[in-house]
Image: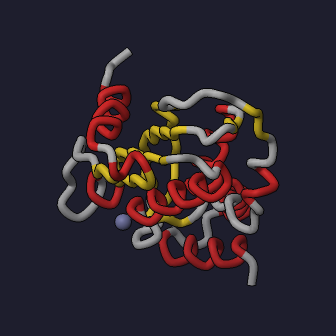
Amino acid sequence: MNIETHIRSILEEIEPSQERLKDTPARVAQSYGEFFSGYNIDISQVANKFYDSSMDDLVILKNIQFESHCEHHFVPIIGIASIGYVPNKKIIGASKLARIVDIFAHRLQLQERMTIDIGRVLESVLDAKGVGVYIEAEHFCISHRGVKKTGSKLITRYFCGILKNDQHLRKEFLDSVFTKN
Ligand SMILES: [Zn+2]
């Protein structure tokens, strides 16, 4: 069965025989196609253009907004990700960093795993001296159900290479992420 058929079954449980909802299953299926479009994408094909560079300090793209879905409750995770890396003779177009966040966000997620996955994929495609990922997000499974704590945010971080080992550099990365403008 496809998603549309399953959604129709769910609707019949919630609100049976509603003529006005007849197009909803198709719309939901289309939305799901968009929400979960991050599977089966070869990231090495996305992050495939590099530029030679003598840049040897931190490169940071911060405040990358994303929307994802919690794999435990199927509800939104809304957050921002910031990425930093210290290049090793090559850099990548900054938009590709945002695109990589989007790919992982368009899957069912746990924020912890998403943070590690983004960090590891950057580590491998960039061959960087170090990578840092900082994510903070509101989880609707915390804010809109269960304990209902609006405004709480889950913070997760990933560091590898020089950003893991050099406390000073790590602090510079986090300071840049936390600076408000
Ligand atoms: Zn959840």
Q: Quadrant of the N terminus?
A: bottom right
Q: Is residue 22 visible?
A: no
Percent coordinates x, y for residue 15 in the rendering: 51, 68
| Of the pair 59 and 167, the residue shown nearer to us | 167
User: In percent of the image, x 58 and y 47: which residue is there?
Assistant: 128
If the picture is divided into quarters, which one holds ligand 1?
A: bottom left
Q: Is residue 95 above or below residue 116?
A: above
The scheme the figure's colours follow is secondary structure
Percent coordinates x, y for residue 175 in the rendering: 30, 28
Q: Is residue 8 above or below residue 24?
A: below
User: In percent of the image, x 45 and y 53: which residue is there?
Assistant: 161
154 sits to left or right of 36? left
| Of the pair 166 and 29, the residue shown nearer to us | 166
82 sits to left or right of 55? left
Q: Is residue 116 visible?
A: yes
Find the residue positioned furthest to the bottom: 1
Percent coordinates x, y for residue 4 in the rendering: 72, 71
Classify residue 139 by image quadrant. bottom left
Find the residue positioned furthest to the top: 181
User: In percent of the image, x 45 and y 38: which residue is there?
Assistant: 82
User: In percent of the image, x 67 and y 54: which residue is there?
Assistant: 125
| Of the pair 181 and 120, the residue shown nearer to us | 120
| Of the pair 123 and 67, the residue shown nearer to us | 123
Q: Quadrant of the C terminus?
A: top left
Percent coordinates x, y for residue 170 in the rendering: 33, 40
